[in-house]
Image (cartoon, helix red, strand yellow):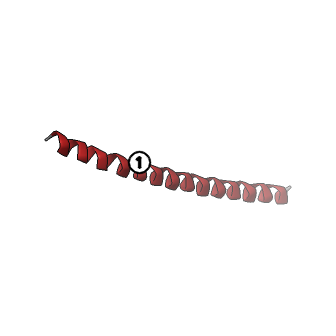
Amino acid sequence: MGSVIYQLIAILIPISIIFLVIWLIRSSMKKSKQLSKIEQKLNELEKSKNNNH
């Protein structure tokens, strides 16, 4: 019974590390896209503000 638990843990740890790395990369990419969208909107607002004055 102990060896079965050890084998499960030995399999789950590398799999969970892989999923963690994938999740971190995806969340980082989402944040990067979100920031660039916000920057673009700010630039558009700044341009429209400068055009009005």
Query: In terms of depth relative to the viewer, which is nearer, 40 or 14?
Result: 14
Residue closest to the eye, 16 or 48: 16
Location of the N terminus (image quadrant) = top left
Tell me which residue sits at (45%, 52%) in the image: 23
Q: Is residue 9 left or right of residue 20?
A: left
Which of the two residues, 12 or 26, is positioned nearer the viewer here? Answer: 12
Image location (x, y in percent) of residue 32: 61, 54
Residue reaching furthest to the left: 1
Q: Residue at x 59, y 55 (%)?
A: 34
Q: Quadrant of the C terminus?
A: bottom right
Q: Which residue corresponds to mark 1?
A: 17
Instruction: Classify 49 as above or below 5.
Output: below
Crowd around label 1: few <14 · some 14–19 · many ≥20 (10 Å): few
Label 1 sits on what residue type? Ile
Query: In front: 4, or 25?
Result: 4
**In the shown orientation, is residue 36 left or right of residue 46?**
left
Label 1 residue SS = helix
